[in-house]
Amino acid sequence: MDIITMLDELQNRALHEPDVRNKFLAVRTAQEPITAFCEACRELGYELYEMDLICAGEEFHAAMKRSTNGGGENSPMLSGEDDFYELFMASII
């Protein structure tokens, strides 16, 4: 299962299961929130690690940029545009 599919399933669970949502919201206060987020994912049965999450965001953003404007890198990246952790958290708040 790829990272985007895992995050989609986890997002759906967080939106429909209050205990899962609370688990994810609690990681925001951890000293290392991305590490805590990935640990919470693994506790729920999804093998997700920090570098997987970071690389998936960067790869997704790069693929999206290649698919527009003739494949050029003409548009600047918006802050957080490739940050799947922040996008996930914003979607469940």
Image (cartoon, grey):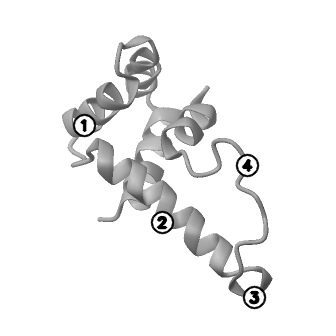
Q: Are marks 2 and 3 in contact (CB under 8 Å)?
A: no
User: Dot 2 corresponds to which residue?
Assistant: 59
Q: CA separation, marks 2 and 3?
A: 18 Å
User: Looking at the picture, does residue 87 appear above or below residue 25?
Assistant: below
- Residue 13: name its quadrant: top left
Q: CA separation, marks 2 and 4?
A: 15 Å
Query: Badge 2: how crowded within 10 Å, few (<14), some, or many (20+)?
Result: few
Q: Earlier in the sequence, mark 1 or mark 4?
A: 1
| Residue 10 horizontal side relative to residue 35, left or right | right
Residue 44 is marked as 1
Q: CA separation, marks 1 and 4?
A: 31 Å
Q: Earlier in the sequence, mark 2 or mark 4?
A: 2
Q: Are marks 1 and 4 in contact (CB under 8 Å)?
A: no
Q: Earlier in the sequence, mark 2 or mark 1?
A: 1
- For the C terminus, the quadrant is top right
User: Looking at the picture, does residue 42 appear above or below residue 54?
Assistant: above
Q: Position of residue 17 (x, y in %)?
A: 44, 30
Q: CA separation, marks 4 and 3?
A: 19 Å
- For the N terminus, the quadrant is bottom left
- Residue 38: name its quadrant: top left
Q: Position of residue 89 (x, y in %)?
A: 55, 32
Q: Earlier in the sequence, mark 4 or mark 3?
A: 3
Name the residue: 37% across, 13% down: 30
User: Looking at the picture, does residue 69 appear above or below residue 75?
Assistant: below
Residue in front for this viewpoint, 41 or 16: 41
Q: Earlier in the sequence, mark 2 or mark 3?
A: 2
Q: CA separation, marks 1 and 3?
A: 40 Å
Residue 70 is marked as 3
Name the residue: 38% across, 31% down: 34
Q: Position of residue 29 (x, y in %)?
A: 44, 11
User: Dot 4 corresponds to which residue?
Assistant: 78
- Name the kind of residue labelled 4 in the image: Leu
